[in-house]
Amino acid sequence: CPPSRSCVCSQDEDPAHHVAPLDLWGDPDEAFARLIGRLQERYELLLLDDVYAHFEVTSWLGLESDLELWLNREARVIEVRAASRIGSRDFGANRRRVEALREELRGR
């Protein structure tokens, strides 16, 4: 993450930016595909391959953020990065977005 407070990432060691990766249950490929399918209903998919997805998220205020997901099959997690494209503060919106994804995966 850049120094701004509008980014969270599961691979960032800075506590201000760190968020836990998303745990997977069942087959990792199936769980990743299900999550991608759900996210495509809400966000614009910019890039997708078998282990990576990049979405553009537009808030109700018209502000854009990036949501990136990396499937780590061995660790059985999805690494995640969510960052606003402009501004240095997002008032926790990206962190809340990641935590909502976590709850969505738990509910399967």
Image (spheres, grey):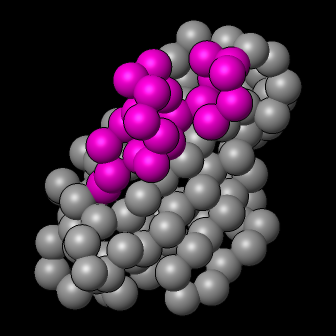
Picture quadrant of residue 33: bottom left
Q: Position of residue 91 (x, y in %)?
A: 57, 11
Residue plotted at (67% across, 63% down): 54
Residue plotted at (18% across, 55% down): 106
Residue 3 in the magenta stretch? The answer is yes
Q: The C terminus lies in which quarter of the figure?
A: bottom left
Left or right of 96, for residue 20: left
Picture quadrant of residue 57: top right
Front residue (pair 87, 34)? 87
Q: Position of residue 95 (x, y in %)?
A: 46, 29
Seen in the picture, residue 107 relative to 100 is either above or below; the reply is below
Is residue 97 in view from this perspective? Answer: no
Q: The N terminus lies in which quarter of the figure?
A: top right
Residue plotted at (60% across, 57% down): 68
Front residue (pair 94, 79)? 79
Front residue (pair 7, 35)? 7
Left or right of 35, for residue 39: right
Residue plotted at (31% across, 81% down): 73
Is residue 50 in view from this perspective? Answer: yes
Seen in the picture, residue 36 relative to 22 is either above or below; the reply is below
Seen in the picture, residue 32 relative to 104 is either above or below; the reply is below
Magenta residues?
1-22
In this rendering, the count of numbered labels is 0
Picture quadrant of residue 24: bottom left
Residue 96 in the magenta stretch? The answer is no
Which SS does the magenta portion mostly show? Answer: loop
